[in-house]
């Protein structure tokens, strides 16, 4: 495998499948099987999953709710998705641990960096729930921060699009895909990869990001096996491996 330890960032919206909200069981099991396939090849896998299929903190203002309260509601939504992914993985005999940025001791372990690393070293899939436990930070930021803390080799952002384009390929048929691009070029071209806090964390810590299509079966294993899938973002804008 190309990378030894990865942080896989999944969107909550992707869990909806073709539904309007909630969790699609078929999509959930697809993700679980994708993760199992790479973990079986010795890759240490950590996962951060969003909560947009249930609730997003930025929706709070639309409902007239306090933003901080809304963000905490969003964190709880990520815990629900994390529990669902944990159950799906354990159903197919993958050992997991769910660590939370909020204290919910009945269902999650509290996040402790050394404990998370030890779980990874023992071959367990580690799922980070509740973001970083503070409002005003997205799950992208949680993914970047946790990846840096556990010394992951790469952040893999699984989306429904097969990489980074000059424009939204679902809206602009003339959009051109980047195979490799530097952090500076992403900022210069104002491309939407992650929120700026998350992206800056990766840039300052020289942590590469790969954006790829997670919804195509087998893509995660092919990517880690060395196939040039998605778009690589790093300091030089070139594949250095």
Image (tube, rainbow, N blue to C red):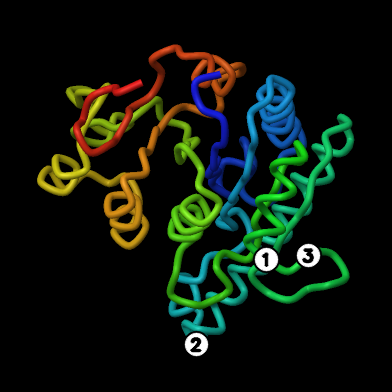
Q: Is residue 197 left or right of residue 154?
A: left
Image quarter of the N terminus: top right
Is 197 rendered above or below residue 31? below
Question: For residue 111, which numbered disc appears in the image?
Answer: 1
Residue farthest left in this picture? 188
Say which mark, if any, is on residue 66. Answer: 2
Q: Is 162 left, or right, of 104 in this rendering?
A: left
Q: Which quadrant does the C terminus fall into?
A: top left
Circles 2 and 1: CB atoms closer than 8 Å: no
Task: Please state which of residues 232 and 88 is positioned toward the viewer in this rendering.
Answer: 232
Q: Are marks 3 and 2 in contact (CB under 8 Å)?
A: no
Q: Residues within 10 Å of mark 1 (few under 14, many from 20)?
A: many
N-terminal of the two: label 2 or label 1?
A: 2
In percent of width and height, residue 27 lies at 68, 33
Separation (CA) of disc 3 from disc 2: 28 Å
| 96 relative to 68 in the view: left or right | right
Which dot marks residue 88? none
Spatial CA span between label 2 and label 1: 26 Å
- Residue at x 14%, y 40% (from the top left corner): 185
- Where residue 144 appears, as percent x and y from the top left, is 44, 53
Residue in the image at 74% along x and 22% along y: 40
Classed neighbour count for the residue bearing mark 3: other residues with Cα under 10 Å, few (<14), some (14–19), many (≥20): some
């Amino acid at each position: 495998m190309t990378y030894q330890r990865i942080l896989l960032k999944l969107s909550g919206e992707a869990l909806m499948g073709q539904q309007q909200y909630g969790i699609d069981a078929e999509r959930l099991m697809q993700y679980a099987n994708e993760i199992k396939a790479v973990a079986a090849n010795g890759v240490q896998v950590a996962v951060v999953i969003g909560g947009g299929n249930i609730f997003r903190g930025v929706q709070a203002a639309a409902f007239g709710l306090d933003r901080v309260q809304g963000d905490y509601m969003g964190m709880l939504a990520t815990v629900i998705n994390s529990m669902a992914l944990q159950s799906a993985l354990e159903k197919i005999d993958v050992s997991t641990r769910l660590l939370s940025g909020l204290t919910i001791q009945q269902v999650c372990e509290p996040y402790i960096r050394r404990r998370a690393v030890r779980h990874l070293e023992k071959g367990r899939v580690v799922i980070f729930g509740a973001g970083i436990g503070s409002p005003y930070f997205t799950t992208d930021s949680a993914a970047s921060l946790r990846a840096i803390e556990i010394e992951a080799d790469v952040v893999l952002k699984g989306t429904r699009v097969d990489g980074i384009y000059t424009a939204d390929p679902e809206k602009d048929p003339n959009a051109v895909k980047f195979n490799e691009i530097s952090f500076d070029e992403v900022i210069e071209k104002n491309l939407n990869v992650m929120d700026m806090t998350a992206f800056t964390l990766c840039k300052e810590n020289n942590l590469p990001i790969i954006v790829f299509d997670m919804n195509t079966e087998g893509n995660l294993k092919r990517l880690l096996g060395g196939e040039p899938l998605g778009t690589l973002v790093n300091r030089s804008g070139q594949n250095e491996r």
